[in-house]
Image (tube, rainbow, N blue to C red):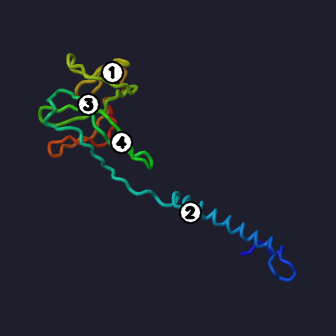
């Protein structure tokens, strides 16, 4: 389709002028640029991203090395997907193994304001130094302003290794 302006620029003889040829080239370049910008934008907006695995498990430690009824802070590395980037992060978790062999893993931040808490063996409880929230070994609030129990990771034992899954917010 030729714009009307180009048709108006044609001389009576029907031959195209130099101006009309330049305008056709400019419109062609403009069309190519528009198409090259519209194609990726259309793909981004109309085609959904690849489905990602919902369950990502991270190996943390050997279950046999955990002392029973003694919380242990473990350090591990986990991949986190942030948009299109995969970020490898160093993380920690408080891990408690009960005498029956079941393992519970807590996120290392208080549910009040996110301060890092620690284990006090003398009192047998987790203590948050920011506002003195206290938690028992099962993660329940025993004192302080914390609104809910400690958040927990999903846990799975595979071949004697503790695997941590998604973090689940505790409810009262």
Above or below, 123 relative to 172: above
Tell which of 114 and 133 is nearer to you.
114
Residue appearing at x 42%, y 47% in the figure: 85
Q: Earlier in the sequence, mark 4 or mark 3?
A: 4
Give the position of the N terminus as an image quadrant: bottom right
- Mark 1 vs mark 4: give the one in front: 4
Q: Earlier in the sequence, mark 1 or mark 4?
A: 4
Q: Residues within 10 Å of mark 4 (few under 14, many from 20)?
A: few
The Cα atoms of the two marked residues, 2 and 1, are separated by 53 Å
Q: Residues within 10 Å of mark 2 (few under 14, many from 20)?
A: few
Instruction: Say which residue label 4 marks.
Output: 88
Residue 148: image x %, image y %?
34, 29
Q: Earlier in the sequence, mark 4 or mark 2?
A: 2
Q: Quadrant of residue 114?
A: top left
Residue 16: image x %, image y %?
80, 78
The Cα atoms of the two marked residues, 1 and 4, are separated by 27 Å
């Amino acid at each position: 389709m030729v714009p009307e302006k180009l048709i108006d620029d044609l001389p009576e003889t029907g031959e195209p002028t130099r101006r009309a040829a330049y305008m056709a080239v400019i419109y062609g370049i403009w069309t190519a640029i528009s198409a090259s910008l519209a194609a990726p934008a259309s793909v981004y907006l109309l085609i959904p991203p690849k489905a990602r695995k919902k369950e990502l498990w991270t190996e943390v430690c050997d279950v046999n090395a955990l002392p029973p009824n003694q919380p242990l802070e473990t350090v591990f590395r986990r991949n986190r997907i942030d948009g299109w980037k995969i970020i490898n992060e160093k993380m920690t978790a408080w891990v408690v193994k009960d005498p029956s062999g079941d393992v519970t893993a807590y996120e290392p931040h208080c549910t009040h304001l996110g301060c890092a808490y620690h284990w006090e063996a003398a009192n047998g409880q987790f203590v948050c130094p920011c506002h003195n929230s206290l938690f028992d070994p099962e993660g329940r609030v025993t004192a302080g302003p914390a609104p809910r129990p400690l958040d927990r990771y999903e846990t799975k034992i595979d071949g004697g290794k503790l695997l941590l899954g998604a973090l689940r917010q505790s409810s009262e």
